[in-house]
Each structure stands twice: as structure tokens, then as C-alpha cells.
Amino acid sequence: MGEPTYSCRDCAMDPTCVLCIDCFQKSPHKAHRYRMNTSGGGGYCDCGDVEAWKSDPFCQLHQQGADQPAKDPLERLPINIQFYMSAVVSCILPYCSDILFLDDQEVLPENLRPRLADPQYNPKDTYATMLFNDEIHTYEQVIATLKKAVDCSPKEAVELATIVDREGRSTVRNGGYRECEQAKGIITRNTTYHRHKPLRVLVMHSAVVSHQTFSLKLLSWLIKIATQAEGLRVIICQELMKNFHGSDLTILEECMLKDTILWKAARIQWHQLFMSTLLMDNEYKKKFAVLFTKHYSGILSDFADDDHDHVVSVTSLSVQIFTVPTVSHMLIKEHSLLKVILKTFVDYTEKYRGADSKLHFQRASLLQGLRRFQYVLVDLRYVLSNNFEDWTAEAREKVMEGIDVLLELLVSMHGMDTVVRQVGQHIEFEPEWETAFNLQIKLGPCLTLLLEWCASDRSLLIRAYRATMKALRGVTHPQPEVAVEVAGHKATCFKFDVGTKHVTVHYALIRFLAGLHLHLGKYNLDYFKEGLLPLSPLTAMELIEEPLRTQVLMAQVYAGMWRRNGFSLLNQLYYYQNVRCQTEMFDKDTIMLQAGSAMMDPNEYLIAVLNRFDLVRYLTPEFAASSSTEDVQARASYATLLEEMLHLLIILTCERYMPGVGNVLDEDRIRREVIHQLCISPMAHSEITKALPEDHCHETGMEAVINKVADFKKPSGSASKGVYELKEQCLADYSPFFYHYSRSDQSKAEEQQRKKKKQQEQELAAVPATPPALCSNFKPLVHLLDCDVFIYIVRTIVERTSNPKGKIWSENSIHRALYLIGLAVLEEERLQARGESFVFLDKAGEGEPSLLTEIQNLVGNSKVKAHKELMSWLIKKIAEVQEKKGEEVDMQAEAAEKELHESAKEEEERANRARMAMKRRQVLMDQMARMQKNFIKNNPEFFEETAEETPAPPPPPPKIERVPSTPDMEECDTSLTEFPIALGANPGDPVYDEPTHVTCILCQEEAAIASQGSSMVLAAFVQRSTVLSKNRDKKVENADDYNPLLMTSDLFWGTYTSTCGHVMHADCWRGYFESLLSREQRRALRIRNTLSYDLGKHQFLCPLCKTVSNTVVPLLPALDTIGKPDDDTMEEQPTQVRSSIPPVSGSYASWLGLILQTTRRGMEIVNQYKAQVKEKKEEQEEKNKSSQPQRKSAKTESKSSPSKQEPFPSLDLEQVLSQLTSDQFKSFFATPQQEPTELFADGIRNMIRTFATATYTVGLDVMPDDDNERVPILAWNTCAYTIQVTEVLLRTQGKALFGGLSSRQIDGLRSVIRFATTSTCIANHSIIQQHALELLAALTGFNTGPDSISILDLDMFSLLVSLCLSLPRLYHSTEATAFNAVISSGAIYNLHILQMVLAAHIVQIMLTAQLPAAQDQAGSSDESMEQDEYNTDAQQLLKVYTELRQFVGLEDGGEPAAWLLWNHVQFSCLPFLRCAAIFFHFLTGVPSPAELQNVGLDEFVPLCRYLALPTNLAELFNLEIAPQMSDLVRAWGSHPDVKPKLTNSDAKILRFPLEVNPLVTLPDDYSDLMNNVSMFMCPKASGAQSDSRAPALCLVCGTVVCSQSYCCQTEIDKETVGACTAHAISCGAGVGIYLRVRECQLLLMSSKNRGCFYTPPYLDDYGEPDSGLRRGNPLHLSQEHYTKLHCLWLSHSIPAEVAHKLEANNNLLTIDWQNL
């Protein structure tokens, strides 16, 4: 189940003929056109079946031995084996039949009951309540019922319901009879609903259950041994064909007739036994088919009353026999298969017939059985898909028997679902109409195939035509007649008013006759041929009557005359013309109308049409002159009817592309269809396929013509798909009145033609093309265009249009009239060349004024201005034809041409005037702009005050010339510009290109970004993340006790922050969010939680862009302006702002010594304090034990929790260190003399705390707690993690470090880094001190306790960010002094921190490096490195590498080449340096160098220069610069965890640089993926139904889980969730990407109850996905789409994408995503 299957579109007899993947890969069909699908679990591979394939029936695997003569399989089986096997099978099959088909399930059969004398016999009987599956009740209903009936837990109820669904039944209660009967009663009562049967539940004897379980095991064994040898299979077949206990029925028949008694698992076992035995042998397949046909009616009747799906019914085996040509032909000729199938359906529909013998369908439960019974029509299609090649008298007779029964069905369908026009009052209830159309859709392919059968034999065609005509006579009743005269011609017409009588769109008989009539010309037959028609046949007038009524009905609906009949009529007319029904409905009506016109006098025909449209009086001068109220009001309706009538005439005379009507091939018909679809717009392959009718093999024939008429345009990006564009030379075939166009299609096509005309700047008049010649039976059709009535109609229209005072005209009617005249002229031109008679121009020139004169008078008329190109073409064409005939040219073509050119000239002049006006406006605007700039420049004093209120756009940043990042960069001239440096003693000047004033998107008020002003915030989304995780098995087990201070190097979790960049006032945001809460609370409970976001998690949508958010991040000004009195007037300062506090100075060695002293002394105090706290806790616990335990309040408990532990007292490190090294201390950590009193306004301070709490709450998934000591840690974490993710994303996308950042990323990074800096300064001093000391202890290696972490396990960038943000608070107790220390001395001590952390990171890299020894590199081309000037630096680094390995105690495995180590370390440091550059760029405001704003340049040297680092990384370990580094390296290498990790082969070692986590590697061919996943078994299921129904592949880690299945549901946080949801929580922190393999659906999940479907990465050759594998085209992996999906995951945009999808499609909100 679920494995890929392949059907060759070129060679398969029908779509049911398939190959498995092994046979397909080894067959010639792989090079053909094929379809791909997934197996449903039934059937077998058709490889080797010569009747299933037109060619190449064998693959290479089965070709061997295919030509050898067949032998009797029993001859190769020993006699004794035959005897014993027959004896065993003869016992097993009757036993299985007896026990599985028991009538009384409460007792065993007498022959199976234990004897009383049996010592093991227990007279106390036990019973079981057995619950059976059906397809009516839902999972939830069954689960709720089980909880009531058997008193089980929800989990147990789910497990039982899953077993019932998979196996078909399950024991839900064991015990005594009374207990089981009581459970049965509860289940029955609770599942009895209106119009629904209750769940089937039986009380069964436990022994019966045991025997039935054993019998299934026996059947499974028989299936297994049947595949071992052909002889064993034949023996089983023989036993199946034996009579059952002496009755007239065989065991096979018994199983067929009692199939509905069994449950799902038992049915599947029997069916698999039949397929593995009877259906694998040609002889027994025919015997099986005969018995199946014999009991067909009973089997299908039982199926209609059954409640199981078709796939688990014995009726599903019909495809195995009815699609085999030899078997189906044998059944037709010997067992009247067609008659049996059709008679079965006709007999079943008898209950739906009314007194008039017509089918009447009402909305009731009875229709459910009819829907199931329509599978009979599927079987009929199977049979008709194989036509007879050689017709015999016996075959004709049997087929005719079936046609007679079919006509009986068509008689009951003919005229069903009639409607009457509602007048005065709207219809109250919409009538049921869907069932009739569903029947038509199912029956349509069968009728098409049967017509092909009739067309293949002359005798059968005649007999079918006579029988159909006879049936039509039986349903056609005499109609009153009326004489109608038009244009001097009289005709007798039927008196019938469509607007008052019963009408319908269902005329099945007349359409079947039209299909037969189409093929008469193939055998030189026609309507008037002697011997063709029966007695009293229908006249031509009668034949066209009913199709004509349908056309009039459509016209009246378009005219708005049926508005009160509701939507049911509109829907019926839609499907009447829709591609699914048009072939057997609309097209057949058109053919019959065309046939009728060929059989009648054209004048009489048009009079009949005018009479049925009720347009005879409308075309008279009396109506035009009438001013009565009734006539005036009816003008609009009559005008629409006239337009529709003319449209019908165009269709009848122009649409000749049906083989049999015109001299065309079927390829010409398809070509015309494709051209007109592409005239609407360029279309994808799937869109064209949907617009074309399919045959019984689901083929449209499009591939044969598409490349001739269109060019394929490949997809240009991941968001687009390939489309076909129509070739220019095919535009001449376009007809605006194409008969398969709907109203909307016609409008779109006309608009598309106008666009092309405008683009190409040429005239593209929609003039009629010469239609193909007609077949002999339809040749008289052309004379519709030269008869007197036609001349009268078009002349009347032209006269009314040319009359300047005329009011009875319409643009559409004159357009259609001119088009028809053009068709008539084209016909005369063609027939004149052939010497045939056609007198349109002769008649058009008669009269005073003549039609030609009236047409000439239209030239220049404003009423036809929209069709002037058509007019010009028509006049010229008439003149050409008259000239060819040698007649005097009446038409003044030159005048029309002149008028057309004058009109085009006017349009061109108008366009030129518009262009000139635009140029003048642009010149004036430029002049005004220059004058404005000069005035501002000359009068700057006028704008000094307003500069504070209106921010001026920032000037462009200074031009920085690129400095080459090559080793010889010292030789370059860099005097033209200064390279920006962010850190060190002489940092560059900060440059801010950010706006100083912003506008709130809610209140639209402008406000300044300032620390003391109003609080402005950005909508932000904080989420837990595992995107960078290198260990997905690692989890935060207990969030309440987890200490996130030290981020591990595997980055197994993190907190990411993103923003959409839209600004709001904090107060406006609060009001907006509170309004969302109040609105949700006002909702009724039943419609709550139907939002695309989760309000319970404080989520909301950005009011502007609708991006999902869950908090806001404060918008802060530049850090060096905070706390200054003029920080809200930054616009007065120049763009480059320099700190007012002079930078400090000091050596790295001195700073490092102070840090080591601080860490050592601080950790002593910390350890002392922890010991004191531990003693106090133990004393308190003793007191609590001795005293009576009292219930603590929630407040007390929360205070005593580990996460709320009271921090140790503030350390007076300033005094301690100043006593030791006062000079160095002052140089590094001196406090500024002037301290501002307050850094931030209260509103901004509150927003900082709000965002900090949000990061803590979401990051650790805990309850909000503003005072928790871990809140600042999460602020640092989200800052570092967001930067790391951004760097990884830029690296993956191949973008420049700074040049590739989007505006949203810049806003987010700037806001988060400033928030992290400021939040640290306003946090609790003691908490930050403790965190800073612990960070230093981890970095320096002073903490060597059992909980200590080695250098290999530390994420250095997170450590860098945390130290840079927390270290100022270590020496400054107040937030103001700490913040000023960041500004004054941050550049120098941040550099020292960076140097120290980078050195530690290099140690990580060298310890985990896997480099070959130098001797292994002998002979390498890199030996030239010995002469390189960097050789000395590399040797220094190699020396550090050697000493480090000695400190660790690693064995000497040979030193690597110095240059190789140098390159490795340099390359591995790049991710860290890139992250550091981003961090310090936004922290300091120093602009980035040009080298980092472009792609493709060497980044290492520019990064080092920007960060003030030495390019020689060995300098970081230079003992002359920093003697303490030796002790640090020794401490790092001597940690007790380092050596075991490096020497243990089983240990997982992270090696640097860390690779970007990719999505799982997918195969290029989707069928390979399906084949791999098809072997996946549900981990919680067993037995025959253990295959997973919907396996889903996690694209993050590659795990396969069951999706949308109750079997694998688990409970998380007291909520039951599906396997996909549970896995997403553990693998992706709630975010998941799954590929549902069997449906080729991509599932995105953002939380437990939010998800959406996304475009899968597998596309066909036309650049389109195939979700659900509906089209079945071969699919291949699109790397472009997969890369886009990868970037979507890396950028953490899945929650936003899900929210957008849910907002766009509310239907997705109804899906229970948590159950997936």
C-alpha cells in the first residue's frame, strides 16, 4: 500500500493497467509518456499481461521464458503433495466459510463445540461485545460512545476506535452475557441519529471470536503458499470452485454473496486470496468472471445497502475482469454482460421513477444508495473501453440487447428535472439538481464509448439509430402548431412558450440520436436514406425542437427573465456548458441543430428559430414604431434574445470542427480548443488540460498539438510556473464567439486581444476565419447564410443601427450581424471557386436600399466605432468577391479604408498630445524643484526652526573606496579614505542613516525616537527555535529549573526575534491588542478560536501587513545619544555623531589581568554565598520537618523556587580592585564625572521590560515573571541567536554580510541589540553581577566543579554577547554609570573581550580539527607556501596547536602543514567574525566597510580590520603581548571533559565551522521517494492493516510519522495531538515541515493548532506541482523551490507564512491541525 504505480499513456489499454516500480524501471515504457500514482493496496502488477498493453507487455525481468509454451502447473507438482494439499485446502476453506459467515454469532456451530467430557472444558461461557466499523460515524462519535459504554479512558477509547477503523471491528467489552448486552445497548442508543443507522455491534461468544481470528490466519497462510508454486495455486482454485456443503453454490459464490456480512479485515483476506489464486490464472479468471456476472445484480444491491467503502467490497474486483478484452467480450457474447449491467442499474432506479416514468430525485437518505450504485456505470465504462475488432452476428445481437436496456434508461432520463419560470414570487426552496448531473457525468463516458462501438459497424449503427428513433417517438407527444410568416416565407411551427411551459436541460435521447447521426456519413447514410428510419419517425422540425428549447432557456436566463428561479437553474446551465458535461449535452444539441438545418429548408429553419426565440414581431417595423409601455419595457429583453439568437447562428454556421460535421480530424478539433483557451491568457499545462474534455483514458490529446500552436515559457522563479503562450500565426484562428466560451471567458479573450493590439501597435481585428468544408450530410447548412430570412434579419439589424433616431439597436447585435455577413461572404468566395451556387451577395444587393448599401452607410457611424476594423475588412472582402465574380463593385472600399486611417490618425495624435503634456509637466516640476533647492540654499535661516519638527532626509553616506583584501594590501594607496574600525582605542565615528521621526501606523501621528519621549514600538515575533541545533535529541527537560546562561556549542535551542518593521505608539498597541481580546470575548463559544493567530499566547497580526506577532520591541535611539538632554533633537546634529566622553586606553595584558583577578575573587565570594544559602536551606528543611506542615500559599511557593532564588549581595569589587591596581582600574573602568539622573521615560522602561518578559516566557515556555533572574539571560540569548541565524541565512543565500540585509532585518537587529544593551543596564545589579562572574568563570576555566562546562561545549558568540552586555554592570552599581561606561570605554574593553573569546574559539577549532599530517601532503602543489610571507604567522599558529595538544594530553599523530592549519583556522573563524561584525556594527554605529557590502570578496582581512583584530591570529596567543594566555590555554586544555571527548570514538564532537543545517536530502525522482516511504509501517498498528495511510516525512530530520491518524496520537500538556504535531514540538520547537508522500502535499506547522499547505518542491516537466497526484505526471525535485523552502525555514518565516495562508483561506481554519 502506498508504493508507486506507473501507467503508460502510449501503450496501456486503459488507465487501470499499471506496473510496479521494479518492472517499470526495466521496461521500454520508461521512455514513453506515463502517469504516476500510489497504490491503494488492491490489485497487482500487469507486467506480462499481453491484453493490458498495446506493445511491450514484458519488462526485462520477466521477458525470459515468455515465449516458452505453457505447461500444466500440476505436472510439476508431486502426486503426494497434490493429494495432501487438496486434503488440507478442502478442510480449511469450508471451515473458514462456516466460521466467518455464521448466522448466530452467540454460539459455535455444533461440530465445533467442545465435548462435555473434555477435562479442559469450562461450562462458564464468556462473551465479547464486538464493535464494527462503518463509513458513516466519525472518530469523535465512536470515541465518545466508547467512553460511555465501557467506561474507559480517552486514550483507551482512541486505541479501540483506531483498531475498529483499521481492522473493521474490535472487542470493546469482555465478560458475561448481561454485561456485554448492556454495553451493546449503550452503544446503539448513543449512535442512533436522525436518518443514520446506529453502529453495528454484536454480542459474540468468545470461542466464536477465537475461531474467526484463527480462520483469518489460515486464509493468510493460503495466500502465502499460493505464491510459492503454480501447482499449489491451481489446487486452491479447484477447491474454491467446489460446491459448498452440497448446495448449488460454490465456496466462491458463497463468499461473493455474503461479502457484506464480513468486517473489513476478513473481506480483505478473501479478496487477496481471490487475486492471488483465481485472478492469476486465465482459465479460472474466466470462471470467476462468469460467476461474478451471474450474481452481479445481487452483489451490487448488497453493496448499495452496505456502509463500507468500495475498495473493501467484492465489487471492486470487477476491474480485474471487465478490463480484460477477451474476458469482457466472452461475457458479452455468452452471458449478455451489457444487458446484465444496464438491467441491474435500470431495475435499481425504478424506485426513483414517478408517474410519468421520469426520474425524480429528492434530497433524502435514499440518494446515498444511488450514489453507491453508480459504480455500476464505472463497470460499464470498463466493459466499453475494449471495442470489438471483428463484429459477428452474435456480438451485434448481444450489444443491441444492451442498447435496448440503455434506451430504457435514457427514456427515464429524457425530460427529468423540469422547471417552470417563476413569476411574481421567488422560489422558496432550491430544487435538488445535483443527482441528475452526477448521473449524467457518470453516464457520459459510457455513452461516448457506446457511440464509438456503433460507429465501428454499419449494421449496428443502423439498428441503434432505428431503435433510438423509435424510443424518441414514444416520448414525443403531439404539439399544437401555428403558421408563421417571415420575409414572404411561411412555415408551420410548434406552439410552445419556453417562458411559461415546463422545460429542462435533460434531453438524453435526442442527444444519443445526435451522436449516432454524426456517424451516418461514414457509411454514406443520411436521414432520407431508404431503410434507415422506422415507421413514423420524427420530422426534422421535431428533432430540433428540444435542443432549441434549451438554447432559448439559456438566452432567457441571460436576459434576466428567470431570476426568481434561484441558483439551481444557473448551476444547471453552468454544468450544461461545462467541460465535464459539454461533450454529451451542449455539443450534442449543437450537432442536432446543425443536422436539422441540413434536413430542412433554410427559410423554414430560421423561421422556427425566430418563433422559438419569440423574435418574429420584434423584427417587424410595427414593433420598432410601437410606443406602448409593454413594448418599450420588453425592448431590453428582446435585444438580449436577439443577440443570443445571432450567437447561435454563428455557432451553427461556424463551428464545423467536429469530425462528421466538417471535413476535419479530431486533431483539428483539439487544436481549435487549445488556441481559444490560450486566447484567454497564457496558461499552464494543467490549466489547459482542465479546460479540455477527457476521454475514458483521461487523455485530452493536447500534447499532439500544443507545440504547434504555442511556445512554452519556462518558470522564471520559484513562485511562478511554466506557461504556454499562443504563437502569433495562430491569432487568425481566434473567434470571439467560440461556442465553448463562457461569458467571462469571452470577455477575458476580448480583453487579451485588445492588450496585444496595444502592445504590437497594429490592428488585430477579430474577423471571421474561413471555416472548414462541411461533410456531405451537413452541406446544406451553409445556405442558412444566403436564404431570404437571413437577409431579412441582418438587414433589419443594420437598418436600425444606421438610423440616427433609432432606439432599438445594440452594439452586440450589430457586431454579431457583421460577423455573420462576413461568414456569408467567405462562404460565397469559397463556393464560387468550386463552382457551387451561393447567392448571398446577389440577394444582399437587391432592394432599395439594399443590404450592401446599408452596410456602406455604416461607415463613419459612431455606433460601430468599436468594430471599425471589422467593417473595413468586410467592405474590402465584399469588393474582392464581387470583383472575382466579374460584377460591378458596389462597395466603396477606399472610403472605408480612408475612414479607418483617419480614425487611427486621430488616436495617434491624441496619444502624441498626451505625451507632450506629460513632458511639459515634467519640465515644470524639475524647474520648481531647482528653484526650491536654490531658495533653501540661499535662505537657510528660514528653516532652522522647522528642522526640529520635520526631519530632513539623511545625506548619502560618505563614499568609501574599496580596499583590496589581498596580502599586498599595504602597498595600496589608502590615503583617499579611512577604513572604518568599530573597536579599539581609536574607533571610527558612528554614522546613523536611520530616521529620527516615525509615524504610528494606527493613529498616523508622527513622533520622535527618543529615550525621554513617547514610547514607540515595533511589532515583533519571538519564537523558540532549533534551526541551528546540532543535537535534536537534546531537550530542556525542566524549564523551571533550567539555567540558560551558558549556551552550549550544539545550539540545541535558542530564541529568535523577528519584526515586520512597522511602528506604533505603545499606547496605541495596547489599545489595539485589548480591542482584539474584547472582540474575541464577545464571540459565541462555538465560533471562538477561529483566528489565524493564537490570542491565548498574546499573538496578534500587524495592523498594516498582517504579519503574525506576539510582542513589541521598543524603538530606541542611538546608544550614544541616550541620557543626553538633546537626544530627542538628533536632527540638529551632523550625521556623524561622536561620543562626548574621550575614549579610554589600556593594554590587553593589563585588562586580562584585572579580569582574572576579578573572576578569582568574585567566584570566592559567590561560592561562599552559595554555601551559606545551602546551610540555610538545610536548616529550614529541618525546621519544617519538625513542625507541623502548613499549606504554603502560591506566593510563598513561587519565592522558594530555584528560579526565584534571592541573588547574593552586591559585590564591592570597585573597592577591592582599586586597592590592588588603582591606576589600571581607573584607566579601564572609571566612572564618568557627570551622571544623568534618568536614562529612560517610564513608558519606554515598561516596554523594555515587556519585551524582556516576552523573550523569557516564550524562550523557556514558562509563565511570565518580570523579576526572575533569568530574564536578562534570555535578552542576551535572543540577541545572540538572532544574529547567528541572520548570518547563517545570508551565508546560505550567498548574500553580502551587510549589503544583503533587508530593511526588516536591519530594523530587527538594531532594535534587539539596543534593547539587550539597555535592558542589561536597568536590570537588577546583583543578578547581572552574578551572571557576569559565572560567564567569566566559564571562559577562564576557574569553575572546575562537577557542573562545570568545558571549552568544547561553549558557544563562543553567545558568550561574547553576554560578556559585552553584562561586564559593565560588574563594576558599576547604577544603571546610568554602567550605561555611560558602555559608551565611554566600550570600544576598548569590547575589543579585549572579543580577543579573549576569539582565542577560545580558535582553541575550539584547533582541538576539533581533523587535518592530515604534514608528511601526507608531500608533493602537494602548496609547497610554494614555504616561500610565502605568511609562513612565519602560520608557524606561530602551528606552535600554539602543538602546545595545546600537549596540554590536553593527546597523542602525537603528526603535525599538519602550517599553511593547512592556517587556512583551516582562518576559514573556521569566519562565521564567528561575521556575527561579531554584525553585533558591533549595530552596537557602535560605525559603518561597515565596502568590502563587506559586496559578494565574492575575501572577508577575513576586512573583518579583522573592522573589528581591530590582528590578521595574524597567532598574535592572540603571543605571551609577550598577554602573558596570561599561557595559563588560559592550559586551563582550557586541561579541563577533565576535554580529553575523554577527543579520544572517545563514540563521543559526538562538533567540528568547526558548524555546517548550516540543511533540509533532508530528497531523491530527484519522486517515485523513488514514494517507493522508500511505502515500506513504512505504522509503529502502533499490526496485522493486515498496519500500513500507514498517510506517512509524512519530516524534512528537518528525516523521520517518517503517521499524519492525520488517530493511531499515533499522543498526549502533550494534557492535550491529545497527532504524530506530526508531537514530532514538531520535539524536533522544531513547535514548527514543522512535512511532506505527505502519498499526496505530494507539503505541510507547514507553526503550533499545535495552526498549519497550512504549501507548494511542494517536486514539480513536473511543466514547472507545476501536483498536490494529491491528480494529474500523475512524473515529478522531479526542483532545487530552486527546495532552496526557497530551506530559506523559509532558516529565516523563521513559517509562522508568518501559516498566518498569511490562514488569513487568505478561512477553510484552512476548520482543519484540526493538532490531530495531524
Image (cartoon, helix red, strand yellow):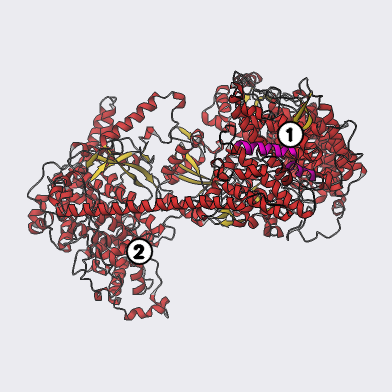
User: Which residue is under mark 1?
Assistant: 487
**Residue 1519, labelled with which disc?**
none
Marks counted in the figure total 2
State the SS at label 2.
Answer: helix
Q: Residue 515 is drawn in which quadrant? A: top right
Q: Is residue 460 left or right of residue 1330?
A: right
Q: Relative to 837, is 713 above or below?
A: below
Q: Amino acid at mark 2?
A: Ser
Q: Nearer the viewer, mark 2 or mark 1?
A: 1
Decide which of 624, 750 is in the foreground and name it: 624
Q: Please report the residue visible at 75 percent of the width from the left and 37 percent of the height from the top.
A: 593
At horizontal 64% and vertical 54% (from top left) the residue drawn is: 706
Local SS, label 1: loop
Drawn side of residue 259 relative to residue 169, left or right = right
Highlighted magenta segment, given as a residue range? 779-800
* In magenta segment, residue 797: yes
Q: Amino acid at mark 1?
A: Ala
Chief secondary structure of the magenta portion? helix
Assess disc 2: are there few (<14), some (14-19) or many (≥20) residues with their C-alpha within 10 Å of its C-alpha. Answer: many
Q: Residues within 10 Å of mark 1 (few under 14, many from 20)?
A: some
Q: Position of residue 340 (x, y in %)?
A: 83, 34
Residue 905 percent location from the top left of the image: 49, 53
| Camera-side residue of 816 and 1123 | 816
Residue 1468's disc is 2
Answer above or below: position of 1588 versus 149: below
Give how far across and how far down residue 1695 sits, in percent. 42, 42
